[in-house]
Image: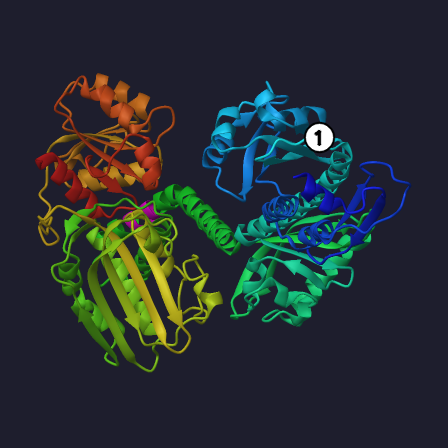
Amino acid sequence: MRAAISAFLGARGASETTTENRSWERFPCGLTTTCQPVAARGGSEFAWPAQIRDLSSILAAATSIREAITRILESLCINLGWQFGGFWQVDSDNNCLHCTEIWTRSPAKEFEKLSRRTVLSPGVGLPGRVWATQKPHWIPDLRADANFPRIAAATTDGIRSGFALPIVHAANVLGVLEFFSSETTEADTSWMQMFESIGGQIGQFMVRVQYQEAVQASKHMLETVLSNIPQGVFWKDRQSRIMGCNTVVSRAFGVAQPQQLIGKTDYDLQGVNPAQAANFIQKDREVMTSGQAILGIIEPVTLADGATIWLETNKMPLRDSQGQVAGILGTWQDVTERKSLEEQLRQSQKMEAIGQLAGGVAHDFNNLLTVINGYAEVVMASMPASDPHKALLAEVMRAGNRAAELTGQLLAFSRKSILAPKVLDLNEAIEKSQRMLRRVIGEDVLLVTAFGSPLNRVKVDPSQIEQVVMNLAVNARDAMPQGGALTISTCNIDLDEESCQQYPGCKPGSYVALAINDTGCGMTPEVKARIFEPFFTTKEVGKGTGLGLATVYGIVKQSEGYIAVDSTVGAGTTFTVFLPAVMETQVSTQPDHADMAVRRGNETILLVEDEDNVRRLARLILEAHGYTVLEAHGYTVLEAHGYTVLEARGGREAMELEKAHAGPIHLLITDVVMPRMSGRSLAEAILHRYPGLKVLYMSGYTDDAVVRHGIAAQQDAFLHKPFSLPSLAKKVREVLDN
């Protein structure tokens, strides 16, 4: 060992300091070693051995701490004659040392095995003492050292002496290098001082590598974050040239790697039109000029594939180390779906507002129509056929009936019609209406049907679904002025979560789809966006009311269904109605009483209606059919027909009249919505005295108002205003007989 050290040191009487600083491409570092003379011999100089100068090359070429340590252990052990070399790394978190690297020239299995699994605290063992003192330490004879826990394994493998030096940087020990020999050797102070300096240089290298690795890890983490966040991120210089971006941005503009956009401006981006680019750059300049962020910019952008999306963009000033604005940092998020949902919400709110308006005027309008149409019908019935005024009165009735139809369409649009849903086979319902359909669409339009079989049942109002088919057929006919083909098809369909995204508000489930396709002129996107708005029409003035498709929309929605439109200009239009399928298999049937004569009666009826004109008309109709009407104002006429009608304006008045009446009461006809007492409350109060009393509700209010007052049109006898003379008489007879 002494010979090896002497050969290593060369001329012992001299000292030399060599400083070698280089810049390497991967890890800049320097190696400075200082050798003091082992014994002063006058100061003659000598050259460092090539082995030590090679340490600089090792540190320069190494790409990691592990690689450098392993090569240093090997080089020093071989050149200095050591049998075993190891590196102990400081674990600052747990305040201990772990042996992470070992190099041996001859087998030392027990000692190596024990070293790898040993954990040392400060001051314990050779590495622990060096860590605690931050100084090299030499043990000439391990057997004589009381603080060497691995002595048993060292003795087994023939290890006799050891030396360790700290790797230090900025007064912190990063690790410890230890070397062992099979010979007992005395400590050499000058040799230890030389390697103390080398340990400092290795520490400098380790810190630089750790810093470089931290920088690389941070860079990789930043790239990973930018690549995986769903938002677009970009940054530009003061000339609005792109300095960097993530893959969300690069792929949106047709390139795979963000580096391909560096140096480009918005004018260079594939798909972006000049007007959009100018707008983007203008916003950049506003941010850079003001030094203030602009947040929440909603703007359209055209992508490389030609698609236009909506972005919510945030732009912030990007500042240099002196705090000066050097560019902008921007983020954007695709909000196309959100914009679409917002537009759907606005459309829904607009249509709901119109529906509320329609429902709000329906009550008064229906009362007026009841009086107009009813009295016109009464007068018409009393006039001889030769009366010249009968034709004029017929025009009044036609206008009144048309007004009633418009009211019904408005209520259908607002989804507030009174429905009478029944389980039915949609194929059968359409087949029954084919004859009428052919007359509606004309001879120049070919009607084609393609019915799915077997087809699930649906629960809808038959008259309403017939109106849906008719309105859509009329709309298709108007789109084919030169003739064409109208195809009506049905099928079962299951809609999942993904499919429902195409139809706003749609819920997953089983449906029956009704599709009506034409080969007409089609629609532009602008027209398509408004087709369900009431009073919107593309027809000439006087050619349409603009309520046809609005009515379809309302009926479908009130039937808990959904409607979709697909149209291309010049290629036709397809309306698809989705109605919920029901598990009931028995189709509802309803007897046809249209041609049955209304039987007269002699029962007593209590009539309650807050509108005088409507109440008087109803009394007139009822007494004409033989009923007795009880009333509170002495207005008794037409009792000659055999009926008795008790008449009252409101609930309280009706209760007083009912108490004063000595005879039986067979039927209560009451308006649903009245001041102070509703029709339902009145009926419940009178039923205490007349448990078997029949009740018929009537109202010109819309479905939601009726339901709120406790009336369910499907369970309770109900008559909607405006009503005709026959409809009232038939309904009264039906309720009394059932």
The answer to whether residue 511 is above or below residue 570 is above
Quadrant (top left, top right, bottom left, bottom right) of the C terminus: top left
144, 71: nearer the viewer: 144
Q: Quadrant of residue 607?
A: top left
Is 639 contained in the magenta span? no
Query: Could you tell me if residue 358 is visible in this image?
Result: yes
Q: 75 or 199, which lies in front?
A: 75
Q: Which residue is more in the foreground, 331 or 561?
A: 331
What residue sits 49% from the left and 66% below the top?
526
Is 42 left or right of 221, judged from the image as shown? right
Task: Tell me if I can see residue 388 in this picture.
Answer: no
Q: Quadrant of residue 468?
A: bottom left
State which region is magenta.
Answer: 369-374
| Left or right: where 116 falls relative to 382 | right
Residue at 32% over, 21% down: 652
Main SS of residues in magenta: helix
Residue 284: percent from the left, percent from the top? 73, 58
Magenta residue check for 372: yes
| Chosen colour scheme | rainbow
Q: Give the total of numbered labels.
A: 1
Residue drawn at x 20%, y 53% as measured from the top left: 462
Quarter of the image holding residue 672?
A: top left
Tell me if residue 133 comes above or below residue 525 in the rendering: above
Q: Is residue 607 left or right of residue 22?
A: left
Which type of secondary structure does the marked residue at label 1 adopt? loop
Binning the other alpha carbons within 10 Å of mark 1 as few (below 14), some (14 to 19) or many (20 upward) gives: some
- For disc 1, the marked residue is 187
User: Which residue appears farthest toward the right when viewing the image?
Assistant: 42
Question: Where residue 627 appears, x then y in whole percent?
Answer: 15, 35
Report the amino acid beneath label 1. Ala
Pick the residue in front: 384 or 428.
428
